Image (cartoon, grey):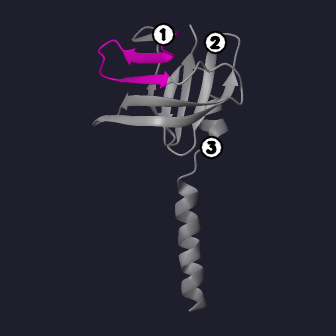
Amino acid sequence: MIRKIILVLSLITAMTGCAKYDLDEVLLQRSEISMTWKSEVQISYTPLTCQISHSEHRNEYRVHDDKIGNWFVVKCSEKPSYVGQKLSADVSWTTDSNIKHGTNLEFSVEKMDNTGLVWMWNKSSKIGLVIKNL
């Protein structure tokens, strides 16, 4: 009986350990505009093949490739302005097989730099964003 309990606890620990998202490694080390979901890069901005836009009035950020096959859109409740800020956002993005949506997700601003890049994190959905205030 004790062996079964130990086995079950070991399996639970192993299963929960596999789903971890290392915020520093997966998101904060990124230097380009991008979106990650569950540790996987969904789209990364490349100047030669992608477009970006930012509506300051709507607090909306868009990134898409030139074929508009891969993209993400983030509409924030307010402008990301300082590290530690909490805000809500609606996010839509493409995956290999469909389009995903997240509505009214809480993000925290984890990092900013002097070029306008903003690193944002949503813990519950494991979404990491690097956007740019243009």
Callout 2 touching callout 1 (CB < 8 Å): no
Q: Nearer the viewer, mark 2 or mark 1?
A: 1
Q: Residues within 10 Å of mark 1 (few under 14, many from 20)?
A: few
Residue annotated with mark 3:
22
Which comes before the other along the chain, label 2 or label 3?
3
- Quadrant of the image containing the N terminus: bottom right
What's the amino acid at mark 3?
Answer: Asp
Q: Position of residue 101 (x, y in %)?
A: 37, 35
| Numbered range of the magenta stretch | 55-75
Q: Please report the residue visible at 48 percent of the width from the left and 17 percent of the height from the top.
A: 61
What's the amino acid at mark 1?
Answer: Ser
Residue 21's disc is none
Q: Please report the residue visible at 55 percent of the width from the left and 20 percent of the height from the top.
A: 131
Q: Residues within 10 Å of mark 3 (few under 14, many from 20)?
A: few
Residue 116's disc is 2
Q: Is residue 32 visible?
A: no
Q: Residues within 10 Å of mark 2 (few under 14, many from 20)?
A: few
Q: CA distance from mark 3 to mark 1?
A: 30 Å
Residue annotated with mark 1:
55
Which quarter of the picture shows residue 90? Answer: top left
Which comes before the other along the chain, label 2 or label 1?
1
Q: Is residue 82 visible?
A: yes
Q: Please report the residue visible at 36 percent of the width from the left and 16 percent of the height from the top.
A: 65
Q: Nearer the viewer, residue 60 or 22?
A: 60
